[in-house]
Image: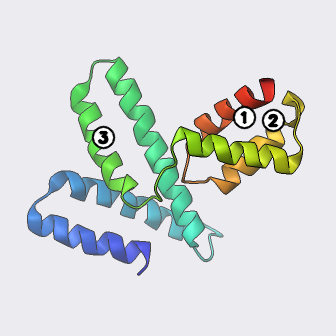
Amino acid sequence: MSLSQQINDQMKQAMKAKDQSTLRGLRAIKASLLILQTQEGGGEVTEKDEMEVLVKMAKQRKDSIQIFNEQGRSDLSKIEEEELSVIEKFLPAQLDSNQVEHEVKLIISQLGATSMKDMGKVIGMANGKLKGKADGKLIADLVKKILAG
């Protein structure tokens, strides 16, 4: 079943259950997917494209939550957290920092990276391999720590 179909089915369930927070999150996902599908020159939308949209949406929500919490706006933060929880249901399971560190070390050994000069190659490969499974900032921080040490 495609992601769009899953979203539509869950939207129907949320409407029947009168679950406004879930419905709001599902509508946000549907809107982003529609934008992706109707882009000029977009062509066929792949599962990878859909995952990239979901990862971007999750990152936006996390950034917003942080800003709202810093500004003492727990009311807005709560809305973003609700939407984030809906988005995360469609993302692959996130790796913990130990698993990410292990993957980064494997990539470093594969590339034969030894210094900070190789950081760009390592981060690029790690971001590609762990897309949607780990936060890009965590990856970059771990690469810097390992290559500097």
- Identify residue for label 2: 119
Q: Residue at x 89, y 34 (%)?
A: 114
The first of marks 2 and 3 along the sequence is: 3
The first of marks 3 and 1 along the sequence is: 3
- What number is the disc on residue 143? 1
Alpha carbon of mark 3 to alpha carbon of mark 1: how far? 29 Å
Image: 97 above or below 54: above
Image marks 2 and 1: residues in contact by CB distance under 8 Å: yes
Question: Which quadrant of the view contains residue 78?
Answer: top left
Q: Residue furthest bottom?
A: 1
Question: Which quadrant of the view contains residue 98?
Answer: top right
| Residue 4 point in image, percent of width and height | 40, 73
| Residue 57 point in image, percent of width and height | 45, 49
Image: 145 above or below 90: above
- Identify residue for label 3: 81
Tell me the kind of residue under disc 2.
Answer: Met
| Residue 117 point in image, percent of width and height | 89, 31
